[in-house]
Structures are given as C-alpha cells and as structure tokens.
Image (tube, helix red, strand yellow):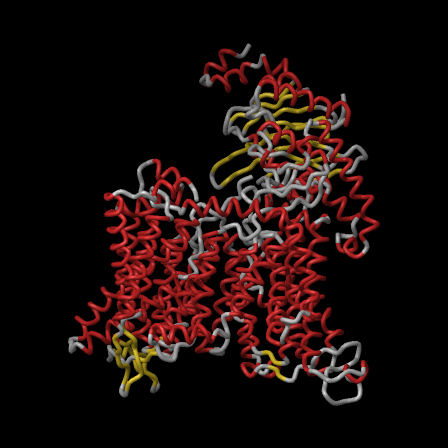
Amino acid sequence: MSDAILKVEHMTMRFGGLVAIDDLSFEARRGEITAIIGPNGAGKTTVFNCITGFYKPTTGMLTLTHENGDTFLLERMDDFRIARHAKVSRTFQNIRLFSGMTVLENLLVAQHNHLMRESGFSFMAVLWPRGYRAHEEEAVEKARYWLEKTDLIHRADDPAADLPYGEQRKLEIARAMCADPVLLCLDEPAAGLNPKESDELNRLLLSIREEEGLSILLIEHDMSVVMNISDHIVVLDYGKKISDGDPEFIRNDPKVIAAYLGVEDEEVEELAP
Amino acid sequence: MEYFLQQLINGLTLGSIYGLIAIGYTMVYGIIGMINFAHGDIFMIGAFISLIAFLILMSLGLTFIPLALLIVLIVAMIVTSAYGWTVERLAYRPLRESFRLAPLITAIGMSIFLQNYVQIAQGARVKPLQPVITGGYTIMEKNGFTVQISNIQILIMVLTVALMAIFSWVIAKTPLGRAQRACEQDRVMASLLGVNVDRTISLTFVIGAALAAVAGLMFLLYYGVIDFYIGFIAGIKAFTAAVLGGIGSLPGAMLGGLIIGLIETFWSAYFTIEYKDVAAFSMLAIVLIFLPSGLLGKPEVEKV
Amino acid sequence: MTDATRESAPAGGGKLAEAVKESAMAALLAFVLTSLMLGVRTVDAPGGLGLQYRWHLVIGAMVIVFVGRLLLKLFWWKEDGGAPAAVGAASGRFATLTEPLRKFAAPALVIFAFVLPFLPIADRQIIDIGILVLTYVLLGWGLNVVVGLAGLLDLGYVAFYAVGAYSYALLATHFGLSFWTVLPLAGILAAMWGMILGFPVLRLRGDYLAIVTLAFGEIIRVILLNWVEVTKGPDGISGIPRPSFFGLEFKRFGENTFHNFFGIEYSSMHRIIFLYYIILVLAMITNYVTMRLRRLPVGRAWEAMREDEIACRALGINTTNTKLTAFAIGAFFGGLGGSFFATRQGFISPESFTFIESAIILAIVVLGGMGSQFGVAVAAIAMIGGFELLRNMDWVKGFVESTFGIENFDPNEYRMLIFGLLMVVIMVWKPRGFVGTRMPTIFLGKERKAISGDLVKEGEG
C-alpha cells in the first residue's frame, strides 16, 4: 500500500449559513485513482474547489505530499500557486477551454510557467529569440505527445471551440497533463460522453495512472467509469462523508444505497447489518 | 457647524441631481449590462430642451411660473425620452446579441454625435437663464453666518424623493417592473415566457431619459447656465455614483449620487475646489478596491 | 443581393402602405426630436436669450427621415423589419474576401509607409497627416495589448500618453536631456504608472475596471491642470526641444545643423520627414515587440486570460502579474507615443489629454478588430486620416452654400459630428471590427488558417 498524496482533515466549508462541506476527512493515495461520488448537491465540486484553492475552506487542513517529501498546506495557498508549486491540475465540470485559441495553443499555455522561465520571462526572448526556440520545440513535442495519447493530433490547429464535446473533455485532460501535475483532479470527465467515448476515457485515465504513475482524484456520476477504474471511493451526501472504501465495499454499503435511492434515515438503520 | 450645515444642504442638492442621472445608468446596466455612455448627453439634451421650452413659453407670454415649469417638465421629459428611445433603437439594439465592447463604442460615438449635434444646433456658447425660482428660508443664524435653504433646493430634493418613491414602486409592483427584473435575470427565458424584451428595454431607456430630463431641468434652474459640454462631466460623475452605490441597484444609485455630491461639495468647501473631481474619483477607486461590487450591490460570487 | 431583399423588392400594395405608415411614424419621431432642438435656436440677445425659429430644418429632417426610412424598408431591410439582412451577409463575404488580401496588404502598407515621403503626392500636409495617423497607430497598438490581447477594458489610456509627454517636456526643459535619452525613460515612467495604477484595480472585473481606469485618466488630467508649479497648469509647457539627428539639429542657422552636415539646402521639410520616420520606426518597434510577445509565453497567457481567467489560474498562471505586464507594456508604448507627441508639437497642455482621446484610441482598437495589428492600423488610417481629410474641404463649403443657400457654412464644425456618427455606423455594420478573425500564434501542420471571430472571447476584465 502506498502513502497518501493528499490528506484532507476535518474540512468544513460554509457559505453564509449554508454548510456545504461538514467535517470531511479522507485520503487519496499515491498512484491510485480516488473517486468522490455522491448525489447532486452533495458538495463534490466544492471539495475540488477547496483542494485547488478556488475556495478557502472555513476550517480544516489539506496536506499534499510530493514523492520527495515536500509538503504543501493547500488551504493556505492561492489557487495558481497550488497549480504551480504543489502541482495539482484540474479540469472543470463545465469545460473551460481557451475557446478562441487552437488546441495546440491550449496545451502551450498549460506549460506557461516552465516556458516563462526558459524565455527569460518572455522579454529576453523578444531580444534574443534564438535561445528560446529549442525550449518551444520541446514544449510542442510534449503537446504532441499528449495529443497523440488523446487522439487529438489531427485537430491540433483547430480552435478548441470547434471540437465536439467529447474531444473537448479529452483536450481539457491533455491540457491539465501538460502542466506536469502530481495530482490530477477531474471534475466529471465523463459527463455528456456516449458509452464509446466514456470507454476511451477509462482507458486514458488508466494509462495515465499506469504509464505516468500519476494520482488521480475524480468526481463522477457515471458509475461504470467509477466502478471500473477507481481504486478507492469516497461517498458524500449533504457535505458529509457517508462511506469510504474500495469499489466492492461501496457497492454493498447500505448507506450509499440509501443515499442514492433516497431512503429515509430510519430505514438505513434497518438496512444496516 | 453652520458652514458645515450649509455645505450639507448644497451637497445634498447636487447629489440629488447626480442620483437622478445615475438611475438611468444603473437601470440600463441592470437590464442589458452595458455602460450607456450617451446617457450624460441625454441629460444635457434634457437641459437644453427645458431651456428652449421655457423660453418659448416666456415669449408666448405665459408668466405664471409654476404652470410654465410644469409644462416645461412634461415637454422635456417627452422629448428627451424620444432621444433616449432613438439612441437605443439605432445604436444599441442592432448590437444586442453582439460583442460586449461593440455597444460601448457605439455609445461613445453617440455621445460624441449628440454633443456636436447640440453644439451645431444651438451654438457653442454658454446659455444663461435668469433665476426663475427665487427666495428661500433661513434655517439658522449664528455668529453672523446664516444657513439658508433656497426654494429651488427644496424643490430639487422634494422632486427627487418623489421620483425615487414612484420608480421604486414601479420596479417593485407593476408589470413593467416585473418584466424589467425578469429581463435582468435572463433575457431569453423572459422572452420565452412572453415578456416583450425589446419593449421592456426600450421602456427602460425611456424612463432613464425622462429622469435625466428632470435632472437637466433642475440643473438648469439651479445653476442658471448650461452648455453642450455639461453632459460629459455630469455623466461621468453620475456613472461613478451608480458604480459606487452598486450598479444595478436603484437605491444604490441614489445613495452613490448623494455621496458623490457630498464629497464634491465638502472637498470644495474645506480643501481645494480644483481637486474636487480627484476626490470623487479617488473615493470611487477606494470603495471599489475594498467593496468590489459597490455599496449596495450584490456581491458577485465567482463560479468555478 | 440577398434573398431577403429580392423578396421584398416586388412590394405589393399592402406592404407599401405599411412601409409608408412606418415611415410616417419615423417622420413624426423626427419631428419630436428636432422640433425644439433644431427648429428653435437660442441666440444671445440683450437682457437674456432670444429665439430664432428655423422650421425649414425641421421639415428637412422629417423629409429625409421619411424618404430614408421608406427606401430602407422597401429595398434593404429584411421581411420582419429587424436586422438589415444584407449587412450580415456582406460582412461575411467581406471577411472571406479580405482573408487572402491581408497577406499582401500588410507588407504593402509597411512599404508604402516607408516610401511615402518620397512619393510625388507627399506635400507637407500629407506628411503631417501621416505623422498623426502613425501616432494613433502606435497608440492603438499599445492599447491593443491591454484591450485586444489581455481583454482588459482600459478607458484611461490617455493618462500614459500624458505621462510620456510630460516626462519628456519636463526632463527636457528643466534638465536639458535630449529626446533620445528621455524616450526610453518616458516609456519606463509610463509603464511604472501603469503598474502603480494597475495594481489596486486589477482585482476589478469588466466595467468596474473600465470606470476606474477612466477615473484615473481624469485624475491625472486634473492634476496636470492644477499642479501649476510643475506643469504650468492650463498654460501648458512650451519650447520643448526638437529631436536631433545623431546630434545634428534641424535649424536654419547654427553650427551643427542637418543641412550643413550633408551639404544640402535647408528645407523645413527635412524636420517633418525626420519626425515622420521617427514615429514610423517607433510604431514598427511597437508592432515587432507585440507580435513577438504574442508568440511568447506571456502573450499566450494574455490571450488565454482573455478567453478564460479561471482556467488560467488552474494552470498555475499568476493572472495578477500577467495583467500587470499587459498594463505596463501598453503604458510603455503609450509613453513613447506621448514623448513623440511632445517633441513634435513643441508645446503640450492638459487639453490634449482628455477622455475623448482615450475614446478615440479605444475606438480604433475595437473598430480594427480586437487583437489584430493590421486591423488597428487600418482603423487608424480610416478614422484619423479620414477625419483629417474632412478638415480642408472647401468644395463642400461651396457646394452647400450654393445649393442650400446657407451662409457661413463651415464643414469643419461637422467633423466631430460625422466622426461620432461613423463610429456608430461602422460598429453596427461590423461589430467585430475590420479584421474579425484571430491568427493562431503557432501551427503544427502546414496550413495556416485564421480563427473565426465568433469563437474568440473579449475578456471580462
């Protein structure tokens, strides 16, 4: 069993009077795919937004540990610093691509921080273009690698907005990967995909885990995706964790069944063995 | 203290005028999300129409001032509304579903056009008007300093409060107000539910222009002198007021107007008159930096 | 013509009647609009204002509106009377037409700009207009970085232009620094102001940013106007030194003069042409730097920020710094433009730095097509060049005076009026600007195709 890459401890998030996340604790282990599931409004995306710094949790501690032992306290970091230093990449529930830029440009923007350093914050490269060229080619190669992996290479010069929905989802993942993450957070990557596409997605995610040795945190509604590829599942309902375990355990947990089927609380007691 | 009180009265008067113009900005912004840069010039047109209508009535021999002013008010509101309607129809409606900056540029173009139109039609020289409403009351007298409130100041404040009350009621209770709020929320959905969106937006411009006409008349009566350029600076101040109060909010516009009026007046009274605009604009920047959606605006939650 | 117009051309009786009715309504509206404003003129009279009635103008306006509306209705507008059908189609065709043209047009334009002073048409007036147009091209390109690329709406750009102009004027008149020393300094000072002003306001979004930048522009102008000890207030600063050509001055008499050194006859044109080339080179530098930056990480980040700021932050881009660089670079170019303006005029006063300047520069950027360098240049030529051409049109004067019997008709009065009207008309005609497409900054394949403007966002900042 591997160590935890992300530890969420006693995280609570309040919006005014509304408690969106209530004392949530869980771990995501290195090199595994962890799924967060739950009915609509359970607070899944809020968890993501806290991890990636777009929201600041009201209380709680989020610790990210790199393989070399560096730790980051995510709740104290700005969103872009989390992406940049803690190396957490994410996608969005409602796809956020740079729609007027080409697919390739999208992937180059993802390598911004690396390229900024190599180009002397761009301004040196205005005066001395030569030294930068090799770095840009390298970045294009990396983009090419991910485009081939996601079968988007033939669309490289098309504007991102022209891609069909399924390909936009894949492009967003490719873009997140170009930022060299250690933890990839995917917010409903299979939403709106047809069975064939979601099958492809499964394979892509598994290969990211196998070949890149990446840890993935995933929000998903599509149970076929969740059950097939997750190593570990966390179930939320009304901002609380109601279950946590491997797919087999979750499948048989009466509390999960109750949350999904909308059974009253008393009946849950009865259902429980 | 007396000096302070006097300045307070002056500031509230000026603020009322700004507030009335600001309502036009804030309503238009609320409903179609654009800065109607030409609105300041609509105000200027209102002032000119008032002046011309008043002079015509005088030349026709109407000497009963209250009646004359009432007619002037109505005429100015109608004609200025027509300008507001036409500007929307020609410069904004064709761009309704277009890019955000396009209507901003047409608005600036319209502003330039209207300024020069009035300059050509009426001449570039300032237009003076002898005081129409005179007299006033002395509120207190102390150490040889008198605090006065003139009749025109009373008129401006009363009229502003009355108009505010009427329009708050219109927005809250009438079908027009409901349609307006529906369009603010979601224009497509509103039209699917049978709201005539074009008409609602047109009416918003008409109301805004009518209020600007009132402000124009009051400006004319209060200062007694207008020119084709008054719209620009008053417009910017009023827009500042609308943003300061929280754009999209009617009470916010009024509050913002009063604050800008007070800041300007007090700054001129206690510091330097030259830098009164700097004071007003700095106040705007400071408020926005700490309260990015204005004083009474709804805070914008960033959706991720 | 398009289908819609073909359908409406054989208008039946009912349709005609409807058109007439609508036109009559429009004419009535015209009456309401013009009756008091055009029909009555306030004139100075002893003891107050007098009135002068001019009903012929009102009737004229009504007739024009009636006939114009009727013709539009019958021959131009779509069935349902809404948007002009031909406009959309025409602009679509225009875009495809200009696409291949652009490849050649841009270099052709540059070559033309470089040879212009040697062409036979180049008299002093033409070169002067050229200088003015190029100044606006430079400013447009500078603002394009902020508005077009980074998607930040800046309504106070003229502030940086003013900072550049006053930097040069003050440093030159007080410390005797030369134009060439001050030029980069003025740019850097303007950039610093850009950062100082930018830092607190970049948290704001959309129109809030617009109004605060406008406010800052006004604040700077008011300070220039009132800080009399330094800026001499409304009197302005005069006697600003002219630039020298590697130490050679453009004067009729003196030791180190241009014509003496080259052994040619003195001509006042030398200095004008020299100024022309200065601004041309400055504009070219601006263009080169911007085009380079667009292909570098910071430029891509600007555009990405315009497209989606949240996604940028999720990718680890520090959007505050990225916005600040856009502000600073834009301000830097504005500062260069300002210095040039000061040295060219020899005199500056706060009057040159009003909001209307910001509005014109912004209009050039938007009319040109946001983000397109070529479009901005075209828009600057069309707007400023066209505007200047309106200046000396004596034939219009003669024509109007003889045809309509109006005395003392002065076409110059109408320049701003037409200018404002054109801004509206062009914008309604082409909301995306002259060049509505975006060229990607890099290609994997061989084919180079532009991205339709409909997909490109304009930012919320």
For the residue pair C43 and C222, the one nearer the viewer reads as: C43
| Quadrant in which residue B218 is drawn | bottom left
Q: What residue is drawn where x is 32% and y is 68%?
A: B216
Q: In this view, does A199 lie above or below A218?
A: above
List x then y, in percent, for residue C178.
74, 78
How many numbered dots are placed on residues in this image? 0
Is residue B231 something one can see in this rendering?
Answer: yes
Q: In this view, does C396 lie to the left or right of C271?
A: left
List x then y, in percent, for residue C335.
66, 68
Is residue B261 something one can see in this rendering?
Answer: no
Q: What residue is drawn where x is 40% and y is 64%?
A: B40
List x then y, in percent, for residue C265.
75, 84
Q: Is residue C226 above or below residue C310?
A: below
Q: In which quarter of the image is the C terminus of chain B?
A: top right
| Quadrant in which residue B53 is drawn | bottom left
Q: Is residue C193 above or below residue C81?
A: below
- Residue positioned most to the top: A273
For the residue pair B83 and A217, the one nearer the viewer reads as: B83
| Quadrant in which residue A144 is drawn | top right
Q: In this view, does B207 lie to the left or right of A191?
A: left
Q: Is residue C19 above or below residue A238?
A: below
Q: What residue is drawn where x is 54% and y is 18%?
A: A256
Q: In which quarter of the image is the N terminus of chain B?
A: bottom left
List x then y, in percent, for residue B175.
26, 44
